[in-house]
């Protein structure tokens, strides 16, 4: 427990984070890109065609990882918002600033790839069903967080406002998750559910999992990189920043 507390407090220190994150970023990029290459080649070139959808199903290797990761990023932003509200931790605010842009882009790509997938599968690129509409709401929430952050000049007040909106907006995540179970939708239900048989062939599942892990690693590297940049901007007048830049 003491180890957790020490690590928690250290990660709240900009100098500690700035020096410690550097060694992680390169590794995350290398591992993530390697996994994405393997998963994409495997999924596009070597998995069998789907019995009903044919080759159009292969967009799953891009659509599903981005859709899942966009939701995880929103949850992480909400958790960071809670941490900031309770402990006023600077790094929680830095994380929110760095993650919301990536979350918005991933959500937009998930919607776009869903449209591309839906045209040959449903015969239409968009329907106002519960799943697609709730994901669109998530995109609007990300855009709202970005706009709210930019509209308030005082960084402390901006962080407070973003934290509150992120926490309230997290109520949309269960709607996205369970919309296919609660409502009648065109969107297919989850292929992997706890306590249920896996509804996707393992030959298709493995490259999907590899691509998901690869995207998670790359996204983590991107967020850490942006966090280091924001730390330098916020702490540019601090003595430790000058020392860090001189030692490079």
Image: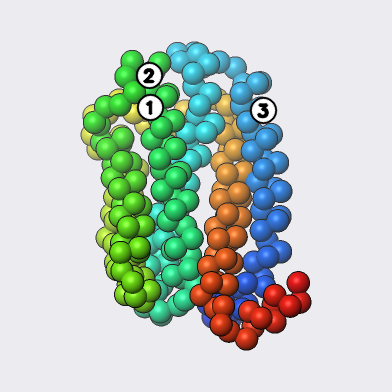
Q: Quadrant of residue 177?
A: top left
Q: Relative to the observer, which residue lies in front, 77 or 51?
A: 77
Badge 3 is on which residue?
41
Comes first in the chain, label 1 or label 3: 3
Tell me if label 1 and label 3 are in contact, CB under 8 Å.
Answer: no
Residue at the spot x=42%, y=24% of the render?
Answer: 116
Q: Secondary structure at mark 3?
A: helix
Residue at mark 1 to residue at mark 3: CA–CA distance: 23 Å
Residue at the spot x=30%, y=55% of the render?
Answer: 144
Tell me if label 1 and label 2 are in contact, CB under 8 Å.
Answer: yes
Residue at mark 1 to residue at mark 2: CA–CA distance: 6 Å
Residue 195 shows in this picture: no
Farthest residue in the bottom direction?
A: 239
Q: How is the image coloured?
A: rainbow
CA neighbours of label 3 inside 10 A, class few (<14), some (14 to 19), many (20+): some
Residue at mark 3 to residue at mark 2: CA–CA distance: 24 Å
Residue 63, above or below 162: above
Residue at the spot x=43%, y=37% of the render?
Answer: 110
Residue 104 circle label: none
CA neighbours of label 1 inside 10 A, class few (<14), some (14 to 19), many (20+): some
Badge 2 is on which residue?
119
Residue 235 shows in this picture: yes
Residue 47, above or below 157: above
Residue at the spot x=44%, y=40% of the render?
Answer: 67
Residue 26, above or below 83: above
Q: Secondary structure at mark 2?
A: helix
Q: x, y (%) of residue 218? A: 60, 49
Badge 1 is on which residue?
115
Q: Is residue 203 left or right of residue 124?
A: right
Q: Relative to the observer, which residue lies in front, 8 or 148?
A: 148
Residue 8, above or below 183: below
């Amino acid at each position: 427990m003491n180890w957790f507390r020490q690590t928690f407090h250290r990660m709240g220190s900009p100098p500690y984070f700035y020096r410690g994150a550097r060694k992680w970023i390169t590794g995350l990029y290398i591992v993530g890109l390697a996994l994405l290459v393997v998963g994409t080649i495997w999924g596009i070139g070597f998995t069998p065609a789907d019995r009903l959808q044919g080759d159009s199903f292969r967009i799953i290797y891009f659509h599903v990882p981005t859709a899942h990761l966009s939701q995880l990023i929103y949850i992480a932003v909400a958790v960071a918002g809670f941490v900031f509200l309770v402990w006023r931790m600077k790094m929680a605010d830095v994380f929110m600033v760095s993650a919301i842009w990536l979350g918005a882009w991933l959500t937009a790509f998930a919607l776009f790839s869903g449209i591309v997938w839906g045209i040959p599968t449903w015969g239409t690129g968009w329907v106002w069903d519960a799943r697609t509409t709730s994901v669109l709401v998530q995109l609007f929430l990300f855009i709202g967080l970005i706009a709210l952050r930019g509209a308030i000049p005082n960084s402390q007040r901006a962080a407070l406002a973003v934290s509150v909106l992120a926490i309230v907006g997290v109520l949309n995540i269960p709607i996205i998750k369970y919309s296919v179970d609660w409502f009648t939708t065109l969107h297919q239900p989850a292929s992997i559910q706890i306590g249920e048989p896996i509804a996707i062939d393992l030959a298709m599942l493995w490259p999907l999992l590899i691509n998901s892990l690869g995207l998670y690693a790359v996204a983590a590297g991107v967020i850490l990189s942006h966090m280091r940049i924001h730390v330098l901007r916020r702490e540019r007048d601090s003595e430790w920043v000058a020392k860090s830049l001189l030692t490079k």
